[in-house]
Image (tube, rainbow, N blue to C red):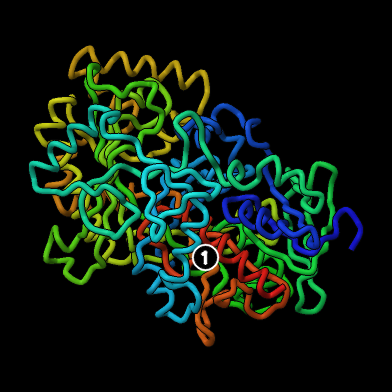
Amino acid sequence: MTGPNECDILIVGGGPAGCVLANRLSASPDRRVILIEAGEDYAPGQEPDEIRDPYYRAVYHARHWWAGTRVHWPHVPDDGAAPQPLPYAQARVIGGGSSVNAMMAVRGLAGDFDAWKAAGVAGWSWQDVLPYFRKLETDTDFSDPDVHGADGPLPIRRIPREDWPPAAVAAERALKRDGHAFIDDLNAAPRDGYARVTLNSLADRRVSGAAAYLTADVRARDNLRIVSKTRAIRVLFEGRRAVGIAARGPGGDATFHARTVILSAGALQSPALLQRSGVGPAAMLRALGISVIADNPGVGTGLQDHPTAGVGMVMRSDSLQDPALRPNGTLVLRLSSASLSPDHADADAHDIFMPVYNKTTWHALGRRLGLVHAVLYGPHSRGTVKLASPDPDIAPDVRFNLLSDPRDMARLKTAYRFAAALAQAPELAALTHGTFPAAMTERVRRLNLATRRNAALAAMASRLIDLSGVSRRAVLRYGLGTKLDAATLAGNDAALEAWLTENARGFFHASCSCPMGANGDAMAALDSQCRVRGVDGLRVVDASVMPRITRASTNIQTMMIGERAADLILADL
């Protein structure tokens, strides 16, 4: 293969896993690798300020999103009228989610990966994946070589307790008073308690998958080509063998050919790309007029995210976070719902994750609003990604079906009540003007977009907070769209369930939509080598391959998947 668009390995998507693959698979000059990214490519040090910021300002800049992506968060009955789907901030930039997210670097638990193995996904047990967690990191706080890495491309750090903002300090006092233990290392053996949040950033800048893995030295390799602002339209096949990609870029339509094609486009785009290429549930494809290459019913099924709900806190003017401390994640609480209620006796341990934030977004009003964020780990609910049209310009129909499993609703209600009680503890109440149910409504989402108009509106609302109780209530009602009190909501079970049904959102940890599985599992889109069932020469390597979502944020897991898959691919080659 000698043409500029011909290679040995073609990687579609420059997200966290794609960046890892591009680095590892191009390490030998004998293999020519092309990485295609739909968004902008920024070399390390050349990223826009909002991406370099250790606070996740980049997510509020729409130019880094896939335009038109909309999702249904709650379950929509088949016979019910579906509400309008909501905009979804899926990253479209080199580094993918790692260029716009909150940079939490919390590993999944050993039991998560051992459960993958028990389900028939060979080679992905905790003992199998731990070396790859160590390989990807340089932990700046801990040096135990059996647990942590010391020479990986990704820095891992924790913000010292002496630098914590007022809300975190107060939360620690409240939690200690109630008997909760301090966890020094959240990535060591799991237990319940509160801890310093684990971050993959430096004090002065983000370290995305692109910054860590696509360094100047890697980019200088003659056998690696990065093609940006170019979107894959469909996989090209000869018979049942993938031979390349049809793409669309600034210069128009193009084709890329390869011996091996790897989709790393993320949990929403990878299944949609497969379906558009004729790989997926046959009946659905035929209904859309798409010729079936392989009937693979697992493609687009199994979608998961971590359901979240927030208890907002109106911070007093003397209790704000120092602007020099950029991240808003400093203290986090890990809990087991079974320890909070006998109703959850059968739930997995460590299934609640609860960060305490002193600020919630980039503008002046966001700096006045704290949050106790209840996040449900280990959800049972599953959603779908289905093509709405074979037209690549029409986004897929995405339904997360959050809280559709009653076990998830019950546990999130318990977590929310705990969060409300913590936010109203005397230690935190002394810092606030009260609490409110915090929801990412359309009004809030629009206000959070990074525009000069929103900065001015937020500054005005921030000044109103200090005038009087009447003006504060006006800000909550007209600015944020809420007039409820968090304690009142938490004390009314029916009202809380209705509010969560409408307002629970994912943690932007979309995963499991092209799951690996055992041979013979009809709903496993991939085998344990990340190979797409029913075709040859095609793999998926991103968060969509997870059989079940981990009890942790997915960014680090996705980089680990990239590291592990790279070795599997190299072994095949």
x and y percent of residue 562 in the render?
Answer: 57, 60
| Residue 183 image position (x, y, % from top left) | 24, 49
Q: Which residue is mark 1?
A: 513
Q: Quadrant of the N terminus?
A: bottom right
The picture quadrant where one finds residue 275 is bottom right
**View extreme (bottom): residue:** 520
Q: Amino acid at mark 1?
A: Ser
- Which residue occupies the foreground of this view, 379 or 386? 379
Q: Position of residue 547 (x, y in %)?
A: 46, 70
Q: Is residue 447 above or below residue 184?
A: above
Give me the residue at 43% from left, 61% from top: 304
Residue 75 visible to an observer of this rendering: no
Check the image and report above or below for 323 versus 355: above
* Secondary element at tag 1: loop
Q: Quadrant location of the C terminus?
A: bottom right
* Mark 1 crowd level (few <14, some 14–19, many ≥20, 10 Å Cα): many
Q: How many marks?
A: 1
Q: Residue visible at 68% across and 64% down?
A: 262
Residue at the (14%, 66%) spot, across then down: 343
> Closer to the camera, 126 or 479?
126
Tell me, yes or no, if residue 144 can be seen here. Answer: yes
- Residue drawn at x 65%, y 45% is 214
Provide residue 396's location: percent of width, then percent of height.
59, 57
Q: Is residue 565 left or right of residue 257?
A: left
**Which of 177/354 is in front?**
177
Front position in the image: 102 or 135: 135
